[in-house]
Image: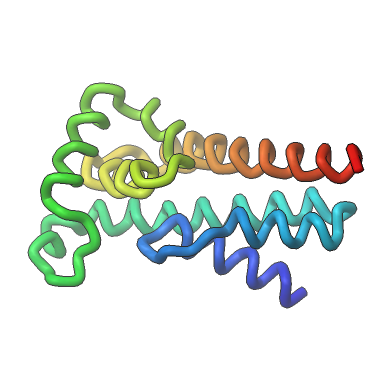
Amino acid sequence: MLSLLVLFLSALGAATLLPLQSEAVLVGLLLREPGDWLILLLVATLGNVLGSLINWLLGRAVERLRDRRWFPFSPGLLQRAQRRYQRWGQWSLLLSWLPVIGDPLTLVAGIMREPLWRFLLLVTLAKAGRYLVLVLITLGGLQAN
């Protein structure tokens, strides 16, 4: 149970502003307990989606927070993400799994007032897809040995 909590928290933190690597935790747990792949996939996805939801909520409040010293995104990075989001719209959320640009995209979705239901649907597809590929690669590697 502790390992699931660690996975959840690392996935949640990795989707926010913390420099965490949930993929390493997931692979480590898969190597230890490959039969638990489905629950591990679900826990990692849930944590990562909730972390993205935190970004979306911050985006909704960004106008009040933007000038704070602790605000995690530079004005330039935020402007680039807004331009991408304006160009590609909601579909850019399918890239929310990517390092570097994924977290700003989820923040910008909040700034741009993306409806919550659509945000959650697209981000869940993206995050679950990334973790599923990682699970399949890891389990495939175990079977090859």
Please tell me which residue lies in front, 31 or 129.
Answer: 31
Q: Residue 33, image x and y in percent?
A: 86, 60
Q: Which residue is situated farthest in the front direction here?
A: 145
**46 left or right of 136?**
left
Q: Residue visible at 32% across and 41% down?
A: 105
Q: Please state if 53 lies on the left or on the right of 33 as rendered.
A: left
Which residue occupies 44% across, 40% down? 98
Quarter placement of the N terminus? bottom right
Q: Residue at x 28, y 58 (%)?
A: 58
Q: Residue furthest bottom?
A: 2
Q: Is residue 142 above or below residue 88?
A: below
Q: Residue at x 68, y 57 (%)?
A: 26
Q: Quadrant of residue 40?
A: bottom right
Residue in front for this viewpoint, 107 or 21:
21
The chosen color scheme is: rainbow
Task: Give the residue furthest to the left.
Answer: 67
Q: Is residue 2 left or right of residue 123?
A: right
Where is residue 126 shown, x and y percent of the image? 53, 36
Q: Position of residue 96 (x, y in %)?
A: 43, 40
How many marks the image carries: the answer is: 0
Q: Quadrant of residue 125?
A: top right
Q: Is residue 143 left or right of residue 12?
A: right
- Residue 5 falls in which quadrant of the image? bottom right
> Quarter of the image containing the C terminus?
top right
Foreground: 139 or 79?
139
**Residue 50, percent from left and from top:** 49, 57
